[in-house]
Amino acid sequence: MEREHNLIPEDTLWKRFLYRVINRSDTRLGKLFDIVLLILILVSTLIIMMESVPWLDKKFHITFLVLEWVISLLFTIEYTMRIAVVKNKRQYIFSFFGIIDFLSLVPFYLSLFFPVTKYFLIFRMLRMLRIFRIFNLMDFMNDGYLIVKALKNSSRKIYIFLLFLIIFSVIVGSMMFMVEGGRPGFESIPQSIYWAVVTVTTVGYGDVSPITPLGKFFAVILMLAGYSIIAVPTGIVTAEMRNKRQNLEKICDRCGNEDIDDDARYCKQCGKKLA
Amino acid sequence: MEREHNLIPEDTLWKRFLYRVINRSDTRLGKLFDIVLLILILVSTLIIMMESVPWLDKKFHITFLVLEWVISLLFTIEYTMRIAVVKNKRQYIFSFFGIIDFLSLVPFYLSLFFPVTKYFLIFRMLRMLRIFRIFNLMDFMNDGYLIVKALKNSSRKIYIFLLFLIIFSVIVGSMMFMVEGGRPGFESIPQSIYWAVVTVTTVGYGDVSPITPLGKFFAVILMLAGYSIIAVPTGIVTAEMRNKRQNLEKICDRCGNEDIDDDARYCKQCGKKLA
Amino acid sequence: MEREHNLIPEDTLWKRFLYRVINRSDTRLGKLFDIVLLILILVSTLIIMMESVPWLDKKFHITFLVLEWVISLLFTIEYTMRIAVVKNKRQYIFSFFGIIDFLSLVPFYLSLFFPVTKYFLIFRMLRMLRIFRIFNLMDFMNDGYLIVKALKNSSRKIYIFLLFLIIFSVIVGSMMFMVEGGRPGFESIPQSIYWAVVTVTTVGYGDVSPITPLGKFFAVILMLAGYSIIAVPTGIVTAEMRNKRQNLEKICDRCGNEDIDDDARYCKQCGKKLA
Amino acid sequence: MEREHNLIPEDTLWKRFLYRVINRSDTRLGKLFDIVLLILILVSTLIIMMESVPWLDKKFHITFLVLEWVISLLFTIEYTMRIAVVKNKRQYIFSFFGIIDFLSLVPFYLSLFFPVTKYFLIFRMLRMLRIFRIFNLMDFMNDGYLIVKALKNSSRKIYIFLLFLIIFSVIVGSMMFMVEGGRPGFESIPQSIYWAVVTVTTVGYGDVSPITPLGKFFAVILMLAGYSIIAVPTGIVTAEMRNKRQNLEKICDRCGNEDIDDDARYCKQCGKKLA
């Protein structure tokens, strides 16, 4: 979520107007622009999905192609306009959304010269991430920002938890390889680790499941462990989220009360009017 | 949960009496009415379920038909009574429960003129929602109201979380389509997205599961991610629920603020000292 | 967890001694009694389990029979002793554990006169519940009591949540019956409801899974809903458990601070010594 | 996480230097040592995994063998150095990591004299646990320590919860054996208990699933129960983790109490005003 320092143009009036339409949503045209963009992104994503369905692609191949052309051209215009309009062009181009904008256009132009492969897909799909920019403008992301912040603050604990989980799964998987080794789904240690992760995360596809009584016994222990372990990430994030609920900067001048809600206008401990 | 303003009739005594029996449960007859209604709804739902089981329908077809007739007539009488009894008829008819009452009767009367299709089913099933009205009367829903309020307050965060989850699943599904593409269960992007959602929510049917080592590797990462992500909605609702534990009876005399913490001594909205 | 009022015998010395051995664990003999009982229960449960495995039962049928005889006789002696030793015999017999003790003995004596059926099993398995009594004595259950209390306090909210979950599953199951109706696993509404519950609770056996694209689309929505819903019971219990952590009766006389930990000896807000 | 009392050598300068390199990461060489060790552990683990994959082992058997030799020799040197360098040798050898270091070397030397069996595997895998020691040095484990402490503090509650869960699963499994007894997957009580655990922990492989309508009905109840029960461990750990959020740096000058809440102004153990 980049800051807009040095991005605002100052030179000409129409640039300033265009900048506002594209990057803000406080004008009628700006809102319209956002909505049209949102629809284009969704339509574009839907086309990519439908293209991958054989019978749909067969039937509507030309339609999809034309639509893809039109949308890609519109996105190209939008991308050019964004560059034209910002003051510090380099900053935009190498910003998170600048790279996304670029990457999601590349596959289309590459496909004009090279045969289309399914590996282009994932880049085209990156367009979906642009939805977040629009919502960002629409002042819808304050709550989302809180979630991201809580996740970021607890990220170290979550990394350690994941590290522990991976080592745990590797050891349990190796043990299971000793117990069930050779039976379908337990042909090697990596396979057994796959099973261990499927089990401990309670996904439980069932494509691999223990066969021998001893294997089932181990599986039961692993499941009970996984069922208790699931509490850890939840506990971490919940504790962090609780913390983020309070405006940490606010404090009452008179009584020093720090437990002040976001919407509070008076201190709930001493009744002083808050600044 | 509509308010009862303008619904209470004032004209005649028997209307007032009937209103009380139907809409309150503070009289003996009122309680009896509620219990009979509850039983009728449950029986009706059970019949619909059993009708769908081929061998049961074959054996008891006539019984089911007769019971359905009787119950539908009783519900029609009840519906008429409810309209007759309220003062502001339009308000009731277009209220949430008014529409439910109407919709759950329509299929029965339509089936007299048109051939019965299974699409009538879902409307008849809506009757189950009426259970909530009865429990509402029975003063059982205070706790339920707290849950609903906590969910409502955190709904924005949950929407953003779901949006993120959907975009995440779409991108992961597309990546998996590139890896496993063409193999059973990964024939198209929508199919792969279906797999991604099944995996990240830890449902894990196993009707689709990764086959190649690379696919399994991606699946393991997705599962570990899903296992950590599950903490987010839990954290959101838990944090909100903690907040909603606040004393609901407390209210500020001066400004009517109802959002008062347990330990508050002054209203945080207007600064008035609380009793 | 019954109270021991009127259960303590006062008449003879040996009765008082025996009572202490059986119902307390503050003597050496009392502890030994508990451990022997615990072992007997575990052995007895293991035998019942192993009896149900065909090849084990074939091989060790006589051994199991003899062990079952011996253990049942020991349990009978223990039961008789318990009755003999308490003052208010009726109160013990009709207490929770009294009934469990009786029910777990009945199948053995019935099997002397009637052919053994597998329905006796469940009663014999009830013996396992007696483990809780032993742990209760061993002063191990304080923490368990906190859990039970937290669950009890939030039971109303959990009931409403379950009610909502059931109605939700019934309606979703009915909708899925309309979509997938007739396909394997969706032959009737009850079957479809079974699928809905398997999905929404994220169990996901995979014995029933959606087949049509529309069915998969509905399933995806249901899964995302289930993934968010899971937060509700967690939120309820967590909020309740937090609450149980603080001694709710404690309050500081001087400053009125109610946030006092169990182990606090001084008010953390004003430093006053707590009673 | 053992303390380092009596482990620091005082005799010679090079011993002190080596000790610092091995056991600390505050020097350049010390950091390099940690990173090399980390890479060796990861490579070693990867080799063990790849050895278990038949076609990989066939192709690179000699490479794996040589690498295993080299790494094992390096680990042996490291182990010898660790012993040589510490003052109190016995304390290191019988410490948690000392035993891990030893156990992960034994299989290699045994394999020189005895035929290699897959049971050596698990000991070699224990090397992974050494990763924690390195992270410990890297000052990365403070957060991890918090998690471990929260789990330890709530371990008693979790044990009781697991005990309850096991007894619950055993009784439900036995009941299911009565209902579905003899059908595939429910051939014996232990099998049925396996199913019960798979279900209640929401893993749901689907290798065993109820077949009869009555069995499905029981399964639905079990799933709904499991869905509510999952809240319990989460609630326990979350509540504990909230508690552990307290400022760990804060300590009472007078009595040394470390359990000080963020909002505390006086020590709750001795009443001293906190700075």
Image (cartoon, coloured by chain):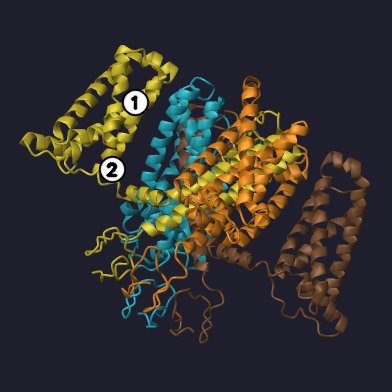
Chain colours: A orange, B yellow, C cyan, D brown
Res. A50 mark? none
Quadrant of the snapshot with the C terminus of chain C: bottom left
Of B237 and D170, which appears nearest the observer? B237
Using the rendered view, name the quadrant where residue B104 is placed. top left
Looking at the picture, which amino acid does disc 1 mark? Arg
**Vertical order, B28 against C239 (above or below):** above
Looking at the picture, which amino acid does disc 2 mark? Met
The residue singled out by tag 2 in the image is B1
- In this rendering, position of residue D143 left or right of residue A274: right
- For the view shown, which residue lies furthest in the front direction? A12
Of B67 and C126, which appears nearest the observer? B67
Q: Residue at x 35, y 14 (%)?
A: B61
- In this rendering, position of residue C45 left or right of residue A160: left
**Vertical order, C274 against B236 (above or below):** below
Distance, label 1 to label 2, CA atoms, is 21 Å
Label 1 sits on a secondary structure element that is helix
Q: Earlier in the sequence, mark 1 or mark 2?
A: 2
- In this rendering, position of residue A137 left or right of residue A159: left
Q: Residue at x 51, y 53 (%)?
A: A144
Of D20 and D111, which appears nearest the observer? D20
The residue singled out by tag 1 in the image is B124
Residue D70 place in picture, x, y as percent: 91, 58
Residue B19 place in picture, x, y as percent: 14, 37
Marks 1, 2: nearer the viewer: 2
Quadrant of the snapshot with the N terminus of chain C: bottom left
Q: How many marks?
A: 2
Label 2 sits on a secondary structure element that is loop
- Chain ID, mark 2: B
Using the rendered view, name the quadrant where residue A211 is placed. top right
